[in-house]
Amino acid sequence: MTAGTLSRRDLLRASAFALQLPNSDTWSWNRWRQITAETPPNLTTLQSGQARLSDLLDPPLASATEWPARRASLRRVIDLFLGAGPAAPPPLEARTDDELTLDGGLTRRRVRFQTEPGEFVPAYVFIPARPSAKNPAVVCPHQTTQFGMDEPAGLRGNPRLAMALALARRGCVTLTYDAACFGSRHNPASGHYGDAVPFYQRHPRWSMMGKMAWDLSRAVDYLRTLDFVDPARIASAGHSHGGYTTWFAMALDERIAAGVSSCGFDTFRHDGNPYRWSHATALLPRLGFYLTSPRINPRNYSGVPDSGTIQIPFDMHWVLALIAPRPLLLTASDDDNIFPNAGWSTRQAEARLRPVYALLNAPDSLQTLYFRGGHGFPPEIEDRAFAFIDRWLRR
C-alpha cells in the first residue's frame, strides 16, 4: 500500500480522541491520584466561576510595557496545571542512525537526541536539496496516531498530514519525532496513554502536556545545533494533537518564532468539560478535579457540559496569550467531529486575543481560518497555512 492510499484500518488508527478510549487497567485518572496523592488546587482568579472567557486586559493596562507583568501572572496559573519538569535539560548527545536521498535531492535523516537522562527520542530530519547557510526550520509534531512521526514524514497514515515532507519540499528544514505515548515510544500492551503511568511514577509533580512541550523544545535545541538552520527562524506546525502541542510549546518557549495549529484548539468552557484532558488522555490530569457529573464517561464527553467546568481558574486562551506577539495561525472546522464546538470556541478566544496583539503592535500576527470539512487539513487550508509559514520565516 502506498502512502497515498489508506485502508479502513489505517483511517481508524489515525483518527484522534473519539476512537481511542482509555483502558481502565492502564491509564486512569484514579491511578494518577494514587500515584501522585494530588489534592484539588486552591486557587481563584478572575476566570473562576465565569462561564464566559475572561478578558485578558482586565483590569486595563495603560501601555504595552505593563504586558510582561500580566503575562507572568497568567503563566503562574498555567504552570500550576502543567506542573514542574526537570530543572535543566541533559546534553542532546544527538546521533544519526541513517540517511536517505529522496526524489528531487531531498535528504531524510533518521536521528536520535536525548530529552531526559537516558531517554532518546527518534526523529526524522528533512533537508532541502540545496540548503543555504541558514535555512528556516519547522518542527512538525504529529496528531493522535500510533503512526507517530511516520505520518508527518509521509511514510504511513494520512498523506494529507505529511507536513514535514511537504514543508521540506518548499525549502524548509523540518523535523518530526515520536511524541511520548506514541509510535516507538508506546507499549501497545499498556493501552491508550498507558505509558503515562510510568511517566507519572517518575514525575509525579509534572504533566504529560508539560512533557509534550518539553520534548518539542528539545527538538528546537537539536535544530539549533545544525549549521544550516537559522536559529531565529524556527517554527512549529501540527494537526490536532500536533496543533495543541505547538501552541503549548510556543507558550513556554519563546525561541519558537511562529506556529500553525490545525484543528488543535478548543476551550474547556465551550467544549463543555475537561474530560478529554484529564481522563480520556493523561495530558492535564489536575483538571479532573473540576469534573463533577458522574454521567460523563469515555463514550459521552465530547461537547457535554459540566457545571464544575466554570470553576477552572484559567482557560486555553490564557495559554495562547503567552505567545503574543509572535505569529500564530489557528484553523478551526465548523463541523469538527473531535472538537465539536471548536469553531465557536476559537472565535471567542480570538476576540479576547486580538486586543492583546493590538496592544503589542502586532495585529497581523494573529490569524484564524474557519472552514467546513471535518477534523482535517484540506488543500485550501494547507495552502494558506504554508503561505503563513513562508511569510513569517522568510522575512
Image: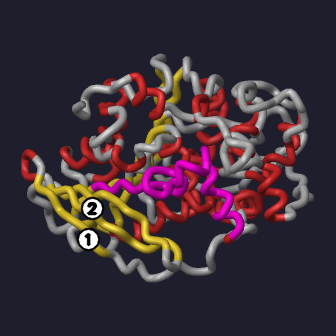
- Residue 222 position (above or below residue 378): below
Q: Position of residue 191 (x, y in %)?
A: 61, 46
Q: Specify whether residue 188 is painted magenta.
A: yes
Residue 268 relative to residue 323: left or right: right
**Which residue is drawn at the image coordinates 49% and 48% (left, top)?**
362
Q: Earlier in the sequence, mark 1 or mark 2?
A: 1
Please provide the residue range marked out in magenta: 174-201
Tag on residue 96?
Answer: 1
- Distance, label 1 to label 2, CA atoms, is 6 Å
In front of the other: 248 or 176: 176
Q: Position of residue 10 (x, y in %)?
A: 40, 30
- Residue 6 position (above or below residue 230): above
Tag on residue 110?
Answer: 2
State the image quarter where residue 120 is shown.
Answer: bottom left
Cβ atoms at labels 1 and 2 below 8 Å apart:
yes
Q: Amino acid at mark 1?
A: Thr
